[in-house]
Image (spheres, rainbow, N blue to C red):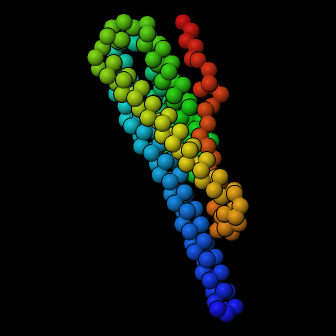
């Protein structure tokens, strides 16, 4: 076996490794994008449930119009950021965390309205919204897991050389805002 065969074998091995590495990076990027899309699906579901919840609550909570207005405004703001293709992940997180916070306030205030708490429609909407919030959290954890795997992949040697040359960049993690880490306080 001549030196040219050895060079061809080495080049073939390098080519196969490059192709496998590139395909792995593309697969990882697509998994992160898919995970982000899963978050979008759950956020859309939440946006669709909120108007129904607000309408159900309106009839019972005549003295809490400020809370309902805040929920509606937070939903509108979150949807605007969500639909803005140029919005950063941090801007999206902030808008979504604001919406989550106002929803918690709404549910806390609803405790003072026994007729509302007994309303089957309200209970069903509250359950659906709670289920959606849980799904959003699960989708965020799934996204963060994919981000971790992808970011690790593009940072380790020797994949980092190919990732850098092909302009693969790190993704940011979804993080809880400072307000999300504290209990909601309702004052009357």
Where is residue 22? Give x, y as percent: 58, 67
How many marks the image carries: the answer is 0
Where is residue 47? Give x, y as percent: 42, 35
Does 132 appear above or below 150?
Answer: above
Identify which residue, 19 or 132, lies in the foreground.
19
- In the picture, measured across the screen, residue 124 lies left or right of residue 152, that is left
Does 187 appear above or below 36?
Answer: above
Residue at image location 57% in from the left, 43% down from the top: 144
Where is residue 165? Give x, y as percent: 69, 69
Where is residue 181? Give x, y as percent: 62, 24
User: Which image quarter is the C terminus in?
Assistant: top right
Residue at image location 69% in from the left, 56% down from the top: 155
The reply to whether residue 165 is visible in this rendering is: yes
User: Which image quarter is the N terminus in?
Assistant: bottom right
Quadrant of res 101? top right
The reply to whether residue 80 is visible in this rendering is: no
- In the picture, measured across the screen, residue 87 lies left or right of residue 57, that is right
Q: Residue furthest front?
A: 1
Quadrant of res 168? bottom right
Identify which residue, 126 or 71, lies in the foreground.
126
Residue at image location 48% in from the left, 14% down from the top: 108
Does 164 appear above or below 130?
Answer: below
Residue at image location 59% in from the left, 66% down from the top: 21
């Amino acid at each position: 076996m001549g030196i040219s065969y050895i060079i061809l074998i080495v080049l073939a091995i390098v080519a196969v490794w490059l192709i496998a590495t590139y395909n792995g990076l593309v697969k990882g990027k697509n998994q992160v994008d898919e995970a982000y899309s899963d978050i979008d699906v759950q956020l859309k579901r939440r946006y669709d449930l909120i108007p129904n919840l607000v309408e159900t609550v309106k009839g019972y909570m005549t003295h809490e119009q400020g809370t309902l207005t805040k929920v509606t405004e937070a939903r509108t703001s979150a949807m605007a950021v969500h639909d803005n293709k140029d919005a950063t992940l941090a801007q999206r997180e902030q808008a979504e965390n604001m919406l989550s916070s106002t929803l918690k306030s709404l549910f806390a205030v609803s405790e003072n309205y026994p007729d509302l708490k007994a309303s089957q429609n309200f209970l069903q909407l509250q359950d659906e919204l709670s289920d959606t919030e849980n799904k959003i959290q699960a989708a965020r954890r799934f996204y963060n897991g994919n981000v971790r795997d992808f970011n690790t992949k593009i940072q380790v040697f020797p994949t980092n050389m190919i990732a850098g040359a092909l302009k693969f960049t790190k993704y940011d993690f979804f993080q809880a805002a400072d307000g999300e880490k504290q209990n909601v306080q309702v004052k009357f």
